[in-house]
Image (cartoon, rainbow, N blue to C red):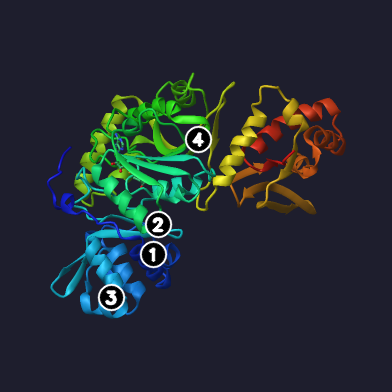
Amino acid sequence: MKGSDSVISETTLVPLSPKDAACFRDVCRAAGYTQTKLHETFEFLVPPPSDRLPPALLASLGPCESPFDVLARLFFLGVPVDADVAGTLLPTAIVQSCLQSGLVSQDESKLCPAATLVPVDDLLFAADLQRTDYLDNDLFVPTLCDAALHLNAVAIHNRGGKTLDLCSGFALHGITASGRSESVVASDLNPRAAEFARFNAALNGCENVRAVTGDLFSAVAGERFDTILANPPFIISPSAVTTYRYSPFELDGFIKIMFAAVPEHLEEGGTFQTICEWVELEGQDWQDRLRSWFAGSGCDVWVLSANRQFPSTYARSVLSQSIDDESELSTQQQQWEQYLRQRGVAAIQGGFIFLRRRRGNNWFDFTELTKPVREPIGDAIAQGFASRDIVFGSDGDDRLLSSRLAVADGLRQVETSHWKDFRWKRDSIVLHLDKGLPVTIGIDGYIRTLIEQFDASRNVQQCLDLFSKEIGLPIETGRKKGLDVVRSMLKNGILVAMPK
Ligand SMILES: C[S@@+](CC[C@H](N)C(=O)[O-])C[C@H]1O[C@@H](n2cnc3c(N)ncnc32)[C@H](O)[C@@H]1O
């Protein structure tokens, strides 16, 4: 470990008692200290580094005159608050809890934050203060980031069973799953992560969370889980600048090692969900490369690609998050590009990879996400697994043909036409799925007619026959052509299977 002698290693939070924690949560709720209000107020969900707060934001703050103002300044922006003002606006018991737990310290007349505290849904999560001088310390426990929010949004809400939050940090995923799990383990390489996980479990009244320390699965050797969620360090770079973000091995080697160990830690039917990045190598089909990682794993694998960047754009977008100086930025960008070029990297893809342990012929499938994931879509992901079981079923097309399907709720159609030769000529029909998997696809009139047949009352074969009749195709041709479309619509969530 490097850099472990800086000041953050001395910060240890003392978990609150159940009574104090409940009181703390009530005060935050009553103050409106919520994700929504923080977003409305500051226009971001992830706390910015407190030593790099945009001057315009500081200038716009105004006087501190409500409990929300105190909490947001201390725990979201990470700036001190006058102790008298805090004492007037917050209940004395809460100020005491903050001081006793170590969330804040008193420096003469100021209360100074020692941690961030972010609300996510109706839970609260403490992590280290966001400060640029902390970032390269191996003991640093980062707060909320976009990747964490994205993984949270796609998490399948399995009921009951054992959950593992792997590479847990402050244990967002484990604690969020705690209410629907029998037990939760939060595991991280960084021992301070376990301290934050324990603090956060107590803060949220979660009694079934165990926090452990170890490399990948080493602290849970021999244990199996029904749900595993992982937001690992995945940034691909010439050198692992920080343990919490950067892949410590060549290119995407860290996630490859992680995936190899997943199956032995999953119960039959159990799922593993991760957000990560992987490379496309020159002259190699990237899907074949990923598929080879999972050969013989005993798991179904679903890859959802959300973005694809060329090495130069990738290097610049990662580096510019921490480097302001243009000449330093371009020097480092060149080094990164050279590193990636020498290793034959054509592009870097980011997205989600989901595994489900299942006996039988396993499938591997790929979906390109055309829009960002913003809302919770765990149910749609579970539905996506069920749909793929139908599409890739070992009984050929029989199961698909006998399934009853319906058009998904939240499907929106946008049609554009132009006026020519005394009539409307159609330019495009685009379907947008506003609920579930964020999908946007262009279709033609035939596919629209096909989709319209699926009203949940008929099976696929009957729908295909009706479709053939409607457009005047021989039944066999209509079935064959239509079936390929149905498979693809089922996989992208535009059609969903009805219960038997
Ligand atoms: C990107 S952070 C994610 C933290 C948190 N799960 C979240 O979603 O916000 C990655 C985490 O992986 C941990 N980590 C890095 N290398 C690890 C390893 N070899 N084994 C276990 N955890 C590791 C880091 O300490 C860090 O907490």
Looking at the image, residue 187 lies above or below residue 207: above
Q: Residues within 10 Å of mark 2 (few under 14, many from 20)?
A: many
**Disc on the earlier residue, 2 or 4:** 2
| Quadrant for the N terminus in the image | top left
Three-letter code, disc 1: Ala
Instruction: For marks 3 and 4, give the CA distance.
Output: 45 Å
Is there a contact, CB below 8 Å, between mark 1 and mark 2?
A: yes
Give left or right: position of 52 versus 45. left
Residue 153 appears anywhere in the view: yes
Out of 320 and 239, give the one closest to the viewer.
239
Looking at the image, residue 108 lies above or below residue 78: below
Image quadrant assignment for residue 384: top right
Is there a contact, CB below 8 Å, between mark 3 and mark 2?
A: no
SS label for mark 3: helix
SS label for mark 2: loop
| Quadrant for the C terminus in the image | top right
Residue 22: image tag: 1
Residue on which disc 4 sits: 271
**Disc on the earlier residue, 4 or 1:** 1
Q: Quadrant of ligand 1?
A: top left
**Disc on the earlier residue, 3 or 2:** 3
SS label for mark 1: helix
Instruction: For marks 2 and 4, give the CA distance.
Output: 26 Å
Residue on which disc 2 sits: 205
Q: Residues within 10 Å of mark 4 (few under 14, many from 20)?
A: many
Which residue ends up furthest to the top in the rendered image? 296
Give left or right: position of 168 versus 370. left
Residue on which disc 3 sits: 92
Three-letter code, disc 2: Gly
Is there a contact, CB below 8 Å, between mark 3 and mark 1?
A: no
Instruction: For marks 1 and 2, give the CA distance.
Output: 7 Å
Q: Position of residue 495 (x, y in %)?
A: 69, 41
